[in-house]
Amino acid sequence: MHTRDQWRLAFFLCVGALCGLALGSVGWGLFAGCLWYVLRLQQSLAELLAWLRNRKENEPPEQPGILEALSLEIDFLRERHKKRKKRLGSYLKQFRRATRALPDATLLLGEDDTIVWANEAAARDLGIRWPEDVEQRITNLVRLPALVDYIESSRNSPSTLIDIPSPVDDQRRLSVLTAPVGDNERLMVARDVTQLHRANQVRSDFVANVSHELRTPLTVLKGYVETLTAQTDVCPPAWRSALRHMTVHVERMQSLTEELLLLSRLESEDRVAAPEFVDVPELISEIQQRTRELNGAEEHMIALDIDGDLCLLGARQELYSAFANLVFNAVRYTPDRGVIKIRWYRDAEGAHFSVEDNGVGIAPEHLPRLTERFYRVDASRNRDGEPGGTGLGLAIVKHVLARHDGMLRVTSVVGKGSCFIADFAEGGIASRQVTQTPLADRDAS
């Protein structure tokens, strides 16, 4: 208790005691003094409460003691809170100015994907206005199926980038990414990548046009070289070595142009237009036969583990190209009498085509870039005397798998070998027995 309050209480008790002594009852006098003190304290507390509720119209209690100290302390805390609030408001204004200046559309999504906040770029790129669209679900305002599926799928899992057309202008492309912020909130950023998309399209068109224009002169050149090589009576012996080298490089250029054209066609469409039943075991058998022809004297040991009833729905020629690239790469980078294991199997996660070898292996720093166009690991990986590839094989594999809802996994250890696995989702899997049963019933009928 404050000293002044102690003296005040003592004063009230003394006055009550004197009054009680005069009236012949000291106890009742002390009780009256305590009651008087409590009533005065209650009045001071009421004045303090009125001041706290309305500081502009009421004055703080002026009674010296603990109530005065309490009023001063409250006033100090209020002033400090006001300064902190002003400072936070200044920070918030700076943040809003900074986010308004961001060139990317930025949104804060709350629970159930409702819009908590959005910058001005969101109206330009996504058609979302703030504060008009606050508390609205983004999936109700932007009805692009790809974006709706992306938001739903990224809610409980790490999100990746997705490219979508702008709902405001379908000629523009946006790259969208979401990231968790706090509890049940996510930050969504949409970047305009129209120029990058156009540059990639121009590059793809250029490569496709050049490859198409090279096909005819290469075919003519190869025809003349084969004609000269076949006419041994006319062709001088000194030219034969040069013609053989010309044949090898013309065939390599033809292979390069064909792969470039195939890659351009794969990039032009996201999915297979008309999926058909693909007998994968038969396809793998064809690849195995061609592998033995290419293998020649090296005599690699090829081990097969194939599920004979497991098939796919897709484009047969594309799957053949993807699987053949994986197998031929294993042959190219596996030493003589090496072991290549080919598996086609199914588990709870889907269907898998696996090619494992005990070749030279791939260093870890090369693995993330294997599927890039023209990316080739150091030439020392090739077997002696084996010409290098075009650097497009794994890029083709990546695009083929993407068109079939699949993905490529690679593991490798230098000096021990590599394992390439093509994973396919359940939606694209078919069974030879299920597919052929209706045909048998139709024949029987």
Image (cartoon, grey):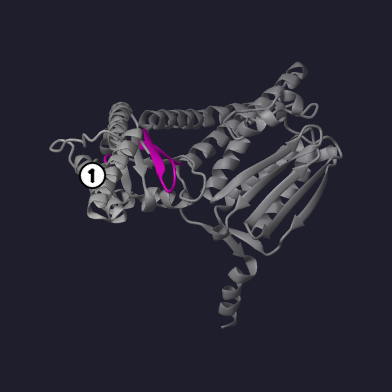
Looking at this view, is 160 or 362 the one in front? 160
The residue at the far bottom in this view is 445
Residue at image point 75% right, 35% down: 332
Would you say residue 388 sits in the magenta stretch? no
> Which residue is at the front of the view, 1 or 89?
1
Q: Is residue 325 visible?
A: no
From the top left corner, tell me how far across and down residue 415 is, in percent.
81, 32
Residue that appears at 34% across and 40% down:
107
Q: Name the residue under label 1.
A: 49
How packed mark 1 is, by other alpha carbons closer than 10 Å (few <14, some 14-19, many 20 or more), is: some
Position in image of residue 241 (x %, y %): 75, 20
133 lies above or below 246: below
Q: Where is residue 264 in the image (x, y as percent from the top left)?
A: 49, 37
Would residue 316 appear left or right of 356 to someone viewing this image? left
The residue range painted magenta reads: 168-191
406 relative to 235, above or below = below
Residue 337 pos. (x, y %)? 87, 40
Please indicate, yes or no, whether residue 431 appears anywhere in the rendered image: yes
